[in-house]
Image: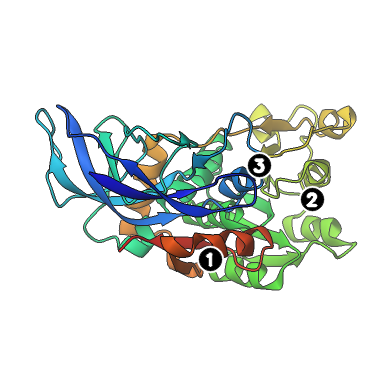
Amino acid sequence: MKAQCIVFPKALEATVGEIDIPDLGPGQLLCRTLLTGVSTGTETRVYRGKQRGAEFPLIPGYENLAVVEKAGSDTTVKPGERLIVRTHLYDPAPYTKCWGSQVSHTLTDEGKLCRVPAGVRDEDAIFAKVSGISLHGVKRARVAAGEWVVVVGLGLIGHFVVQHCVARGAKVIAVDTVADRLALAQKAGALHALDARDTNVVETAKEITGGGAAVAFDATGVASVLEPTSRYLKPREWDDDLAHCPRLVLQGTVEDPVSLEYFALFRPEIDLITPRDCDTADIADSLDLMARKKIDPGIVAATRYSYRDCAEAYPRLVSREIMRVVFTWT
């Protein structure tokens, strides 16, 4: 069968293409896409031609919510079930795949899929992957109830870091330069929202926290911001419990080389944590948290586009005119 797809023929260009979906094999699932999301950082990096290893022309994307249309032999998933599809088994020819989620139909297997709970709406479920990325960082940072956490950079990933920290009972200070994003963070439960352009922003945060946060997330993706983010942390006192070492989380993917002044980490005895994407369990946990109303993707205003209008959508994301794009495939 034929499937429609979004294609990047070259950097800064998006169009619609067509691929062949092969016949269903044993252990495989034929899925029809309901919604796809655009990872504001990663997918726009691919679009700009900055993703290492990506070869144009390509099919981008790693956020796919689909419904099973046919199930092959040796599968436990039934037609009609909704899934977050992580593995795409189709042949992308004449294109290459850069994850390849931006397709109308796909083949997958049971290896890394996540079933969507009945109580989770499609428009929320499509956030499961980006939420999982944020949750993976929160898990790596061992965020605990009662801890002060500073989140710098409130794009999609930073916003969900806020939601997951709040869900764990942490006290969150959100930092950004964009008023709308600060307002969304407060709506998500951040106790304080600080403008990063304020020259006294670090001192303000330290006054609020009584000397500094236990954890600071840099979700900006800007290499030069990492060291300033470390200043929000409370140094470990001599002979204090080693569990009190402050944690600096490089949550946003950084394109440029990162350079840190050694003593900025050494003197406060900071643990530097670099989470990598997410695991299947993080996506499943995110869906569970949605079902239990512990996190709310609906706080983020997603802009919907038909996949046919992809050429209009991506430039708006790159220019930061909008924060989130979701494609429909009907």
**How far separated are the C-alphas under marks 2 and 1?**
24 Å
Q: First in sequence: mark 1 or mark 3?
A: 3
Number of marks drawn: 3
Residue pictured at 47% horizontal, 50% vertical = 131
**How far separated are the C-alphas under marks 1 and 3?**
33 Å
> Please, is residue 16 above or below residue 9 in the view?
below
In the depicted view, which residue is nearer to us: 70 or 224?
70
Q: Which residue is mark 1?
A: 188
The amino acid type, in three-letter code, at marker 1 is Ala
> Please, is residue 218 above or below residue 321 in the view?
above
Which quadrant holds residue 328?
A: bottom left
Horizontal side, residue 112 vs residue 189: left or right:
left
Residue pictured at 86% horizontal, 31% vertical = 267
The circle on residue 28 is: none
Tell me whether the residue at label 3 lies in contact with that at label 2, contact meaning CB atoms closer than 8 angstroms.
no
Q: Which residue is mark 2?
A: 211
Residue furthest left in the image: 73
Percent from the top left, x then y, of residue 68? 19, 47
